[in-house]
Image (tube, helix red, strand yellow):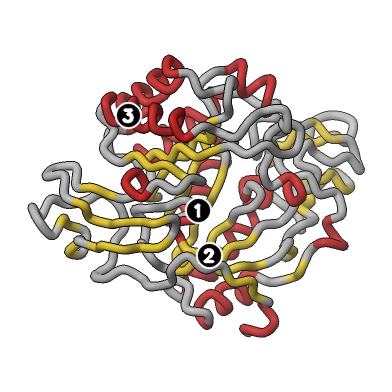
Amino acid sequence: MQTQWYQPTDQGRILCQLCPRACHLNDGDRGFCFVRQNIGGQMVLDTYGKSTGFCIDPIEKKPLNHFLPGTPVLSFGTAGCNLGCKFCQNWDISKSREVARLSDRASPEQIANAAQQSGCRSVAFTYNDPVIWAEYALDTAAACRQLGIRSVAVTAGYITPQARGDFFAGMDAANIDLKAFTEDFYFKLTSSHLQPVLDTIEYVCNQTDCWVELTNLMIPDANDSAAEITQMCEWILTHVGPNVPLHFTAFHPDFRMTDRNRTDPGSLQMAYNIARQCGLNYVYLGNVHDVARQSTYCHHCGELLIQRDWHQLGVYAMSGNQCASCHETIPGVFESSPGNWGARRQPVQIVTLT
């Protein structure tokens, strides 16, 4: 499929304007992401309509804790990525070069219908970064909106100012991965840069209606110092406010970083405490079993609002979007009652649902 966010340059080359990499491509060349290619002077997305598979997940797995709690989300991704993370935990998808062989096919309308027929309240663009297949994601989001289905982007936020307005206008929620808070980490371990991600977070939180939650994967001896976590939390508080949920998640050795240990629970608890002391109201731990720090508490009265055991909801003390105890409005997107999907994960075939 022909795309947008590019311009011709000289001698048949084109400049990709979708992400900050600004790939200059000769005819036949592919970008760093692998899925966008110069064909006869036009940018083509060769993963449009293709997926590496579909699965119904709990929304909490994205992770999103303040967006339609307890509801099922139809999740899918394609192939490729515009980052080069040495610790990638979806590397078999994001680094795939066998797009045609590995991918199922589904149109935006088929995906929207499948979500509706399977009882999903939203569709998530995940597993690999939807920024690189923005046209497919946006067309699917538009088809979903026609049926009252919400759209969720799980992204590293590595996108240009030219493209981010259109992209996030199509999204109802996003989890943005803030991988670290140093340029050195981003440059050496992800082959990208920190500032464009910070610009994206600030833009989406302050200038759009898209609900945002942030995730930080804590990697031992890479981005887990108390000083760096403090700087990150202080930036979040200053630039996007105290009510943007922040998820600290545990690292497990993978891809090209198998020399590190798993994240120690004590490090996660340290990060949790620092974030709360900095003034962030909603902080969570992920990839570990910690019911107390995976649950939601009212920022006004401190009451337990939503209890979580992994992705399974327990106590639920919300009244719509308010604390049932003190009636303080809780930031997020809540309905009159929670979903009951639970923690299960259910692979699906689109063809069987449409």
Q: Tell me the tag on residue 57.
A: 2
Upstream in the sequence, badge 2 or badge 3?
2
Residue 212 at x, y percent in the picture: 40, 45
- The label nearer to you, 2 versus 3, is 3
The residue at the point 76 percent across, 55 percent down is 2
Q: Are marks 1 and 2 in contact (CB under 8 Å)?
A: yes
Residue 294 at x, y percent in the picture: 37, 48
Q: Is residue 228 visible in this depiction of the protein?
A: yes
**SS under mark 1:** loop
Amino acid at circle 1: Lys
Disc 2 crowd, CA 10 A, few/some/many (<14, 14-19, 20+)? many
Instruction: Please name whichever residue, 312 or 214, is drawn nearer the observer in this view of the structure.
Output: 312
Upstream in the sequence, badge 1 or badge 3?
1
**Residue 317 placement, left or right of 157:** left
The residue at the point 68 percent across, 39 percent down is 88
**Residue 267 placement, left or right of 43:** left
**Quadrant in which the N terminus is drawn:** bottom right
Residue 243 at x, y percent in the picture: 28, 40
Q: Which of the 4 quarters of the picture holds residue 312?
A: bottom left
Q: Are marks 2 and 3 in contact (CB under 8 Å)?
A: no
Q: Is residue 207 visible in this depiction of the protein?
A: no
Instruction: Please name whichever residue, 11 or 25, is drawn nearer the observer in this view of the structure.
Output: 25
**SS under mark 3:** helix
Residue at the disc numbered 1: 62
Upstream in the sequence, badge 1 or badge 2?
2
Q: Tell me the tag on residue 273.
A: 3
